[in-house]
């Protein structure tokens, strides 16, 4: 291999790293200020975050990827404060990847609430930690909706968190319906909305909803589960004494 070719390959490897390091260094003061317990996402602008992030330009994706790796490392170390701070910096650097929003919310709702619990922790304390984690995750996902206002994925994640951590079927049903109305939404969002209506004791609404969505379910697409919806319609008709 010629020395020129070797030097070119070395530049290809080192140049992104050399560009990322100054950006990461510049974000350190902001990271320290965001780590203060009283700092909330709404205060990010006042801390100068948007101006600093704006300076990253085309390096946003690379900086966000580096910050995500640090977030994951803090998560592995069960560092709650570090995970939350780095998560906010990651999505501030680049709000475009849904991956950051969805997995960040799961860290907040499902993982962090379990880290500080001692084996003999009272149940009331454990439940409060779960509620607090879910509230943080939902607030985080609402920020994600501002960046992705038509995201069925974020709405579905919010609905699943309500079911898994909050047990709020009413709110989950509303979120699944909203998700079903977004472009490219998976068919199951509408189907789950109907099922939750039935579980909430509203079979008439469930039947009307399933009848409404049935014409839009293609028979030749397995994920649409048209046959399943037809069976549920028949079951609800029998339950309600309809023909």
Image: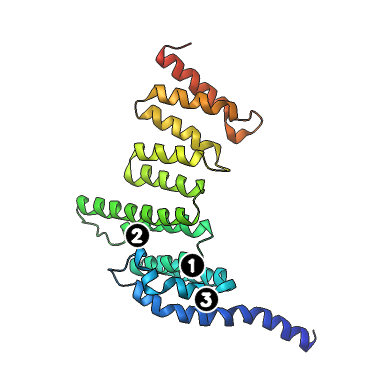
Comparing 139 with 237, the one in front is 139
- Which tag, 3 or 2, sits closer to the chain's start? 3
The Cα atoms of the two marked residues, 3 and 1, are separated by 19 Å
- Which tag, 3 or 1, sits closer to the chain's start? 3
Instruction: Give the structural element (helix, strand or loop) at label 3.
Output: loop
| Residue at the spot of label 1 | 68
Quarter of the image containing the N terminus?
A: bottom right
- Which tag, 1 or 2, sits closer to the chain's start? 1
Q: Horizontal and vertical percent for residue 60?
A: 55, 70
Task: Name the residue rendered at 34%, 26% in the picture.
Answer: 201
- Looking at the image, residue 167 lies above or below residue 27: above
The Cα atoms of the two marked residues, 3 and 2, are separated by 32 Å
The Cα atoms of the two marked residues, 1 and 2, are separated by 16 Å
Q: How many marks?
A: 3
| Residue at the spot of label 3 | 55
Instruction: Give the structural element (helix, strand or loop) at label 2.
Output: helix
Camera-nearest label, 3 or 2 = 3
Q: Horizontal and vertical percent for residue 112?
A: 34, 60
Q: Horizontal and vertical percent for residue 163?
A: 37, 42
Give the left or right position of residue 47, taking residue 187 as reference.
Answer: left
Does residue 135 show up?
yes
Q: Horizontal and vertical percent for residue 134?
A: 34, 52
Give the left or right position of residue 117, taking residue 169 as reference.
Answer: left
Camera-nearest label, 1 or 2 = 1
Instruction: Give the structural element (helix, strand or loop) at label 1.
Output: helix
Task: Name the residue rendered at 40%, 32% in the picture.
Answer: 196
Q: Are marks 3 and 2 in contact (CB under 8 Å)?
A: no
Comparing 182 with 232, the one in front is 182
Q: Residues within 10 Å of mark 3 (few under 14, many from 20)?
A: few
Q: Residues within 10 Å of mark 1 (few under 14, many from 20)?
A: many
| Residue at the spot of label 2 | 112
| Rendered image: mark on residue 5 | none
């Amino acid at each position: 291999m010629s020395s020129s070719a070797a030097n070119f390959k070395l530049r290809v490897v080192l140049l992104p790293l050399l560009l990322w390091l100054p950006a990461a260094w510049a974000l350190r003061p902001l990271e320290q200020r965001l780590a203060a317990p009283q700092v909330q996402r709404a205060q990010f602008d006042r801390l100068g975050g948007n101006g600093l992030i704006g300076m990253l330009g085309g390096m946003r994706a690379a900086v966000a990827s580096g910050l995500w790796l640090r977030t994951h490392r803090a998560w592995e170390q069960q560092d709650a404060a570090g995970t939350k701070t780095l998560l906010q910096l990651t999505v501030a650097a680049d709000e475009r990847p849904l991956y950051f929003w969805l997995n960040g919310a799961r860290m907040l709702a499902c993982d962090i609430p379990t880290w500080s619990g001692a084996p003999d922790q009272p149940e009331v304390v454990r439940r409060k930690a779960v509620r607090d984690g879910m509230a943080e995750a939902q607030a985080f996902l609402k920020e994600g909706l501002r960046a992705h206002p038509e995201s069925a994925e974020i709405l579905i994640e919010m609905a699943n968190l309500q079911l898994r951590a909050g047990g709020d079927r009413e709110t989950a049903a509303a979120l699944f319906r909203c998700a079903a109305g977004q472009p490219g939404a998976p068919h199951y969002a509408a189907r789950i909305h109907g099922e939750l209506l039935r579980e909430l004791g509203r079979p008439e609404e469930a039947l009307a909803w399933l009848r409404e969505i049935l014409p839009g379910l293609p028979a030749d697409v397995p994920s649409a589960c048209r046959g399943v919806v037809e069976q549920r319609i028949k079951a609800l008709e029998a339950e309600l004494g309809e023909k």
